[in-house]
Image (tube, coloured by chain):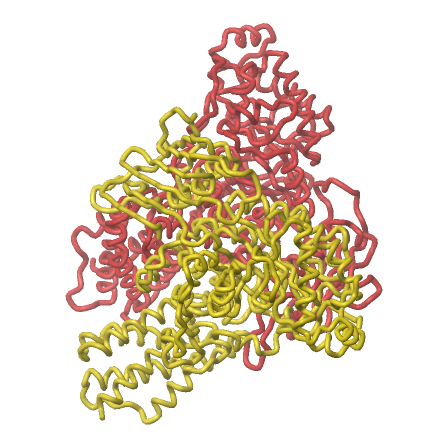
Chain colours: A yellow, B red
């Protein structure tokens, strides 16, 4: 949603006469020139209209006239680069004005998003853009996605597709989590054993990295590499065991969770390695920031290692935290020597660090705001982890400038967000507020693969993008969901694959049979929330080909059901008002009947028979409760209704039946009514 | 379907212990080594099981043991290279034996195709391969696809995806139709104005061509370039007008159909150009065959050009056909000088050509067999043009060694194939039969784009592939359709996009609304057949974004309905037998009701309101006819039933309602019954 929109009546037709002119001091910027070239194939994808590229000289009239007032510094894109634009559509012309190149890129996306099929009586077959006047600029200058490519590798095409989607929703930072215990994912020429022994052959060559950097730059996206240290470093150690604080025998981690392996921060050889490694990587990645991770340091190896203990005594380092600070101070010197600002997770926030660092907060607003009070820049990631399968409404409610709301829990009676019990007060001065640069969504890949990545990113990433771009005042959840549905279709026209991916994985589960029954049945299911699935016995080679992996993180059908229950329970109970609810329960029960033969036949679906039983039970209990509320003659609740709902609301096969909270409301209401 | 299959009980589990060994004199062939590397990601796509590549030395035991008896010549792949293999699966091991590298590639595809989810009571969750013994080799050595990339350009990813699908169904010739009136699609370094002025910027660089050549070679597919001449050459002429026989002012053709422009075969400069051009292109493309087109020469420009007429008189060339022969003789010398065999369409078949040429027959078995009687090699393409939207059953019935059946017509009462009225006799001697090398499917792109290519190719191309690989005796149409449905899903697991493409185009038509109602409504529609749509006013920039472009060429639902009608009409007429028919007509009528708001709102769908009206009418008439046949009290046919069916069976919005022939059968039966 742009900062200001004014829609007037009328529209401009998009057809084969479409043309673009480009003028202003910033018009020669390669990003703008290429973005204009990309408009034509984008219109083809969106509207199916093939238009030969038609860019006219600046002084000639075109359908879309782009003015870029000024050029900016050449490269790389910097934090705070101007993204403002205005877009005016009249019946014959479109004018897109931007202060600088990035604004033109953002405005082009808004223009493309406005292309829609003509509708209504008497409309000509074709596409048009509504007459509109838009003034737009972002609320925060740092709007990112942190993509973990270590736990499961994401090949180049997945990275590029993600950048395409990010451009469409105006995100501007791609934070590339390139190393972790489970894999080191970038070619080092100086230390080639890193990728040879640390990647299972799955890494980006430096040529591929440059390709991604150029691809991101063209889309107005900064790329910040992260090499997490001194923890999360297991994949460095098979190639360079001398770096480790442990026993010297290392292999790539297969399991998940926080592992023990740490760098040894007491050896000079560690810093010699980092000196060479960081010199190479800071040259490869042009952004002014360099992310060194720094999170989740389990001090066991340091505490168990006599040489490290004696070093700590000698240097009066009281504990592991002090040793970590010592490491960070040394690291900071190396990063600074290579002309980069250091970025890291909450844990790097220690005394005596320069004010140029950026702290990425996975702990939340409390630590983010404290850092700002102390004069440090920060970005928020807590509440934005998309791999935890929370609904879009939760992420939309998280704001870097507002107290957090608690995350939905598994098997809750009510998965709607509740106000926080321990209130926090937002008390930052305007100067401190400026230090809150924005936020980053997180996509950790323990349970996400290159196959189902798009289903986990999209469309929910779009609501975080809107939270970080659009005015703070936007908080209408139903409006968000309506627009999100349209946006998800738009993203798929652009090239993201969430729906298709989910359907192909359902097809695999259905085997040689059609997957439609499985799709209908699973349309009210969601994967379990938070970290409960992570606690199971997984490793990075475990097949993620079950129903929980195929379904979308959020069920639209179940949300609609719960909303309908709320309306019904709050209103007058009678058969006319309950008709739609009863019909949807009937359809769900029918979907259970239809899918049973598949669940009983296909081995990967057997674990879902229990889910089908529970859904069936919920449908029956729901029908009973409605009958009671409607006052149907002789209607009563089965004696075990509460137990049935409680049991069906629990995770099964790592999934939740998302109509369960709605059924509980019906049962509660029916029980109150009959008392 | 392999040549010989013997399935026994039992199965071999495919899990993370999967490994491959490779032995024999042909095991070091790069195609085999890389095909083995590709097995692991293929298993991931098919089964969702991540397996780290595990190839053990030849003398060690593995799950899949591949033996390649002998190496063959290095490169390029040649016509007739040995493709035989045998595959034996027991409960613990798989043995794949091939005479030579290509057989190993074919056998690997068969192995991958056998991977299926465990099913049945007591089966472990996972995937396996059934115990089986297969002996397999192809019926024909030339099994191809001719892909037109001139009328609509197909970018590199579309070409590679097509090659992936071709490998899966064991096709071995990619015939690349690289130039035609509407576009010249390959970079020439010697004559760069060809692509500069003849391609609208849409062409393959030589590096991209080499990439495709390598990609195809790894998949056991020969690549044969076609540069069509002396007709279909308009796109050569903007860059090199001196080549033309016309007025000297040329631009790329935008319209479709056979155009006038011809090379001037009387100028020595034409042959100097061809000498340089063919030298360059025969170096770029390594296959031993070089396709010079030669079809559809409209002699107008030759007849109208005084210089050409005087040349013909001087050289005693009686007519345009004689001049075409003269041109071909000169061309043959150039092709031969560059160590290639010449290939061309029917029209090149003229006296005095060497026996090494290959004639590609778009005219049919008659001319193919005549050429064979005269000692010439040939391949069949007539009956295999997938862009004409015929059903799979038609293409499956076309055989290079059998008389053709007539193609289905638009609006036929009965679209089932009928026996030919003018019988042809297959009378080739065994030696002549050997000259029939196989066939090629054709995909002409006048009305097909890079967007909907997969919907037009797949899955129907698979039945042509089976016709050319599998034993001639296979002719069970219901079995073919059952297997085709499974194969279509398998191809999509491999990477073809037919279903997704169709759904995204339906989504575009549905705009911001869900596309499910449009999908249900259009599920009994098909594009018009043959050339009737080509006759309309199209050019290559016409948007192909209508419903006819989005739907699949063949409706499974309508075929099933027609089959059910046949069973019902042939059997006892009573409500028990008609129940399914009546229910499906009810569903179709409901789909019309559900889709109407969309058709009335969205401008691109307005033309389909008439189709919806017709479908509605067909459903009503069908219900009436069934009621009459069932003997329902008071049932009668509306007086206009015949007219309604006749009108609804006609093409509307370039589509056919494919239940119309079934409804006509019901009406006919009802009318006979009431007489």
The residue drawn where x is 37% and y is 73% is A417
Give how far across and how far down residue B557 sits, in percent: 38, 58
Residue B136, visible in the rendered structure = no
Q: Is residue B151 above or below residue B84?
A: above
In this rendering, would A337 be left or right of A645?
A: right
Residue A355, visible in the rendered structure = yes
In this rendering, would B217 be left or right of A600?
A: right
- Of residues B645 and B177, the one drawn nearer to the viewer in this rendering: B177
Q: In this view, does A22 lie above or below B483?
A: above
Give how far across and how far down residue A512 sits, in percent: 52, 66
Give how far across and how far down residue B81 sits, in percent: 73, 45
In this rendering, would A595 be left or right of B613?
A: right
Where on the picture, by quarter, is residue A395?
A: bottom left
Count of numbered badges drawn on the protein: 0
Q: Is residue A60 above or below residue B151?
A: above
- Of residues A14 and B58, the one drawn nearer to the viewer in this rendering: A14
- Of residues A163 and B329, the one drawn nearer to the viewer in this rendering: A163
Give how far across and how far down residue B264 sits, in percent: 56, 15
- Of residues B671 and A521, the one drawn nearer to the viewer in this rendering: A521
């Amino acid at each position: 949603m742009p900062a200001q929109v004014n829609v007037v009546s009328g529209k401009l037709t998009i057809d084969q006469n479409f043309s673009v002119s480009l003028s202003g001091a910033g018009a020669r910027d390669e990003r703008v020139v290429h973005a204009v070239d990309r408009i034509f194939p984008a219109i083809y994808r969106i509207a199916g209209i093939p238009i030969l590229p038609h860019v006219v000289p600046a002084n000639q009239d075109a359908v879309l006239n782009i003015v870029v007032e000024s050029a900016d510094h050449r490269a790389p894109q910097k934090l705070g680069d101007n993204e403002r634009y205005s877009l005016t559509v009249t019946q014959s012309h479109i004018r897109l004005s931007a202060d600088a190149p990035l604004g033109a890129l953002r405005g082009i996306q808004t223009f493309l998003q406005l292309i829609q099929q003509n509708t209504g009586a008497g409309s000509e077959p074709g596409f048009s853009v509504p007459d509109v006047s838009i003034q737009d600029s972002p609320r925060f200058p740092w709007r990112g996605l942190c993509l973990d490519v270590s736990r499961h590798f994401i090949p180049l095409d997945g990275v590029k597709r993600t950048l395409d989607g990010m451009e469409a929703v105006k995100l501007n930072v791609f934070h590339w989590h390139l190393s972790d215990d489970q894999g080191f994912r970038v070619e080092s020429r100086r230390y080639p054993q890193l990728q040879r022994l640390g990647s299972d052959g799955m890494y980006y060559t430096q040529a591929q990295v440059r390709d991604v950097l150029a691809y991101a730059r063209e889309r107005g996206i900064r790329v910040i590499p992260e090499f997490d240290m001194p923890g999360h470093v297991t994949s460095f150690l098979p190639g360079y065991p001398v770096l480790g604080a442990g026993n010297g025998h290392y292999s790539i981690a297969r399991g998940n969770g926080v592992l023990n392996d740490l760098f040894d921060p007491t050896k000079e050889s560690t810093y010699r390695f980092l000196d060479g490694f960081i010199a190479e990587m800071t040259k490869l990645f042009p952004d002014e920031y360099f992310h060194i991770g720094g999170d989740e340091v389990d001090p066991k190896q340091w505490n168990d290692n006599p040489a490290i203990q004696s070093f700590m005594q000698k240097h009066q380092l009281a504990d592991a935290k002090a040793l970590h600070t010592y490491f960070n101070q040394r690291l900071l010197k190396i990063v600074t020597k290579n002309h980069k600002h250091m970025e890291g997770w909450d844990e790097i926030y220690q005394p005596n660090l320069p004010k140029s660092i950026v702290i990425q907060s996975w702990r939340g607003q409390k630590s983010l705001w404290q850092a700002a009070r102390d004069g440090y820049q920060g970005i928020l990631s807590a509440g934005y982890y998309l791999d935890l399968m929370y609904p879009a409404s939760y992420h939309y409610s998280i704001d870097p400038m507002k107290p957090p709301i608690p995350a939905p829990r598994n098997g809750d009676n009510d998965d709607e967000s509740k106000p926080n019990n321990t209130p926090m007060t937002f008390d930052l001065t305007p100067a401190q507020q400026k230090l809150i640069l924005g936020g980053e969504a997180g996509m950790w890949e323990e349970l996400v693969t290159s196959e189902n990545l798009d289903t986990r990113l999209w469309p929910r990433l779009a609501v975080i993008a809107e939270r970080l771009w659009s005015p703070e005042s936007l908080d209408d959840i139903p409006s968000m969901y309506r627009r999100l549905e349209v946006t998800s279709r738009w993203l798929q026209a652009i090239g993201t694959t969430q729906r298709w991916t989910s359907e192909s994985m359902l097809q695999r589960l259905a085997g040689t049979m059609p997957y439609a029954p499985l799709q209908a049945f699973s349309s009210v299911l969601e994967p379990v929330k938070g970290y409960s699935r992570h606690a199971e016995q997984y490793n990075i080679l475990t097949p993620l080909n079950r129903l929980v992996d195929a379904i979308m993180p959020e069920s639209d059908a179940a949300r609609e059901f719960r909303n309908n229950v709320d309306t019904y329970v709050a209103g007058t109970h009678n058969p006319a008002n309950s008709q739609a609810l009863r019909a949807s329960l009937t359809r769900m029960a029918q979907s259970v009947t239809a899918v049973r033969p598949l669940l009983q036949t296909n081995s990967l679906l057997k674990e879902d028979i229990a889910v089908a039983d529970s859904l069936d039970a919920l449908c029956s209990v729901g029908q009973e409760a409605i009958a009671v509320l409607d006052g149907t003659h002789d209607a009563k609740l089965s004696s075990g209704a509460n137990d049935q709902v409680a049991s069906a609301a629990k995770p099964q096969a790592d999934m939740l039946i998302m109509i369960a909270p709605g059924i509980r409301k019906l049962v509660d209401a029916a029980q109150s009514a009959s008392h």
